Image: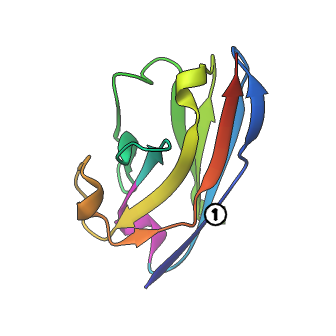
């Protein structure tokens, strides 16, 4: 079992930055795949980024590439999403997700564990 708790969301002006955190507990943090998704009102859950914990390989959605960066602190079992140059269209609830298979996947149904989500609102 894996428990995920996100934090760090908030209201920011366009062009600003936020850093989201996802604290993981339970099963081994280092032997999994962890990802960030987001969901705007009335829209489907959208892939943002994914990282393989063992090697650190990371994949980003085209919409955030060059602006968002995933990092982690293994000692704290925490995954981060640094979001720079934020745009109003980045407004959504952001979710951290995990699966116990070390492989890239951008489909939300492939993830077994989810956090509660954290709201990010970008004003224009």
Front residue of 35 and 46: 46
Residue 114 lies left or right of residue 10; in this view the side is left
Q: Quadrant of the C terminus?
A: top right
Give the image's coloring scheme: rainbow
Residue 29: within the magenta?
yes
Q: How far from the left and from the top, in percent, is residue 43? A: 39, 42
Task: Please rate how many residues cluster around mark 1, counting C-alpha atoms within 10 Å: few if below 14, some from 14 to 19, many from 20.
Answer: few
Residue at 39% x, 22% y is 63
Residue at 41% x, 72% y is 113
Front residue of 53 and 81: 81
Residue 16 lies left or right of residue 31; in this view the side is right
Label 1 SS: helix
User: In the image, is residue 123 above or below residue 5?
Assistant: above
Q: How far from the left and from the top, in percent, is residue 16? A: 73, 20
Magenta-tinted stretch: 28-34
Q: How far from the left and from the top, in percent, is residue 49? A: 40, 40
Residue 40: within the magenta?
no
Q: How far from the left and from the top, in percent, is residue 103? A: 22, 54
Outermost residue on the front side: it is: 42
Residue 92 lies left or right of residue 103; in this view the side is right
Residue at 68% x, 27% y is 122
User: In the image, is residue 60 above or below residue 67?
Assistant: below
Task: Tell me the residue that label 1 is attached to.
Answer: 75
């Amino acid at each position: 079992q894996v428990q995920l708790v996100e934090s760090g969301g908030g209201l920011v002006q366009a062009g600003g930055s936020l850093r989201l955190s996802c604290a993981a507990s339970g099963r081994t943090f280092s032997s999994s795949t962890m990802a960030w998704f987001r969901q705007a009102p009335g829209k489907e859950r959208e892939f943002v980024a994914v990282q393989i914990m063992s090697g650190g390989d990371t994949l980003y959605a085209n919409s955030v590439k060059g602006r968002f960066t995933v990092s982690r602190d293994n000692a704290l079992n925490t995954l981060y999403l640094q979001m720079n140059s934020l745009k109003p269209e980045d407004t959504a609830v952001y979710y951290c997700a995990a699966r116990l298979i070390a492989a890239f996947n951008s489909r939300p149904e492939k993830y077994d564990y989810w956090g509660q989500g954290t709201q990010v609102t970008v004003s224009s």
